[in-house]
Amino acid sequence: VDADGTRVFALDAQAGATEFEPGESSDTWGFNGRYLGPTIVAKRGEHVRVDMTNSLDEPTTVHWHGMHLPAEMDGGPHQMVEPGGSWSPEWDIDQQAATLWYHPHPHGETEDHVSRGLAGMFLVQDDAEAALALPREYGVDDVPVIVQDTGFSAEGEQEANPRGYAGGLGDELIVNGTRGPYLDVHDEVVRLRLLNASTARSYAFAWSDGRPMELIGTDGGLLEAPVELDHVRLSPGERAEVLLRVTPGEEVVLQSRMTPEIAALVGPVAATNGGTDSFDVLQVRAADELDPAPAVPEQLNSIPAFDEAEVVTTRTFELNDSFEINGEAMDMGRIDETVTVGTLERWVVENATSVPHSFHVHDVQFRVASIDGAAPPPELAGWKDTIFTEPETEYELLMRFEDYSDPDTPYMYHCHLLWHEDQGMMGQFAVV
Ligand code: C2O
Ligand code: CU
Ligand code: CU
């Protein structure tokens, strides 16, 4: 914290090396060192600044995924940082407690920069969440689980992912940059913050013994109440907070399991796009003696519905097979949509293709009003900034862009399958 009360963080994008296997070093990128970057934690009401330096030999950016902030601070493709350069965005943290993340956003190179290792979590805390009886001791009973797929050579050196229609897909998982991960737990209840930081792969997370996934939060914050699910599906960019209850000495494995039913949703090209692959994600080992945990509250949050009668503008976004949105590929010089600050908007996202995409909007948390005309399931009833869009399906999203306007600097919306984004499945909107 500096003299005027600003909370300051430092991120240095650098090339380095990571030993995913002892003794086998892979060339990787990372913020402040090896693969990935530090978890940033800040509280609602704080003013933060991130001093970012680029020690790579190519331009990059850092984007604050899920954050409500001025367009100039967003770290999209208009805020490039040259090699040897630096950038110090600052903003007020003004949103509820949530699991956000950060990653580069250079137009055309995002898949490459993220898969090399540039990504990290950004946790927002607030008083309301702090007052709840939820696990919240970072790294002890509140643990980030950053899931990525990659490949390794026989010697254990990391290899680039071969590309399918979805983008690069690896045949092994790493969690928090670790191969074959396990987690020792000493508490009866632990909170896992799942982030799908893969560039292309979607997951269906489930427990090995079939116990329910207890979902408490989505991209933008806590749900109103915990929801029990048999799996949690996350497309690239999405997050989920889940609770796990363990008994002394037991072992349970977080897996990604594709049943034929889920695979069907992942798309008809599932087989060639990894949609049917199953993985062990994280082994959890409970200690023989566990610290007791208080009962999880029945109400976690209050999420008032938007009043659809207040919608001022309805926009349609059609995703097509040529990696375009509304028939156009991303053009850095074209602002596609102009939004009036503070007004309620309805964005109708139509996946007109036969494969899934992942639709993300910067600056805002939205609510899902309907999916093909039907009410969303409970796991999609909370705040979201990224959504898995099933083939040939229409999503109605409600959102309000508040506080910040800037006619000259756009924010982005795009497919979060990063190769699709790089191909141009992205557009720009300005808030005025
Ligand atoms: Cu996570 Cu525009 O990105
Ligand atoms: Cu984003
Ligand atoms: Cu896509």
Image: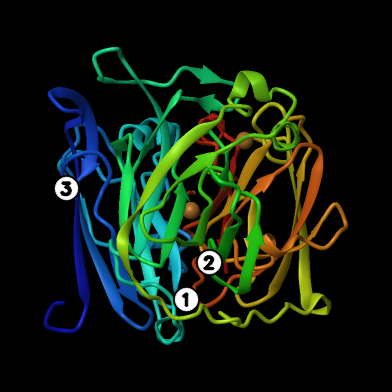
- The residue at the point 57 percent across, 69 percent down is 432
- Spatial CA distance of label 1 from label 2 is 8 Å
The residue under label 3 is 32
- Spatial CA distance of label 1 from label 3 is 27 Å
Mark 1 or mark 3: whose residue is earlier in sequence: 3
At label 3, which amino acid type do we have?
Asn
Give the quarter of the figure containing the N terminus. bottom left
- The residue at the point 77 percent across, 61 percent down is 376
From the image, state whether disc 1 or disc 2 is nearer to you: 2
- Mark yes or no: residue 332 visible: no
Circle 2 SS class:
loop
Q: In the rendered view, does 422 fall on the left or right side of 342?
A: left
At label 2, which amino acid type do we have?
Gly
Q: Position of residue 255 (x, y in %)?
A: 51, 40
The residue under label 1 is 95
Q: In the rendered view, does 78 fall on the left or right side of 7?
A: right
Of residues 208 and 63, the one drawn nearer to the viewer in this rendering: 208
At label 1, which amino acid type do we have?
Gln
Of residues 350 and 230, the one drawn nearer to the viewer in this rendering: 230
Circle 1 SS class:
loop
- The residue at the point 35 percent across, 56 percent down is 121
Q: Is ligand 1 less than 8 Å from the beta carbon at label 3?
A: no
Q: Position of residue 232 (x, y in %)?
A: 60, 51
Q: Residues within 10 Å of mark 2 (few under 14, many from 20)?
A: many
Q: Position of residue 397 (x, y in %)?
A: 72, 61
Q: How many marks?
A: 3
- Spatial CA distance of label 3 from label 2 is 26 Å
The residue under label 2 is 220
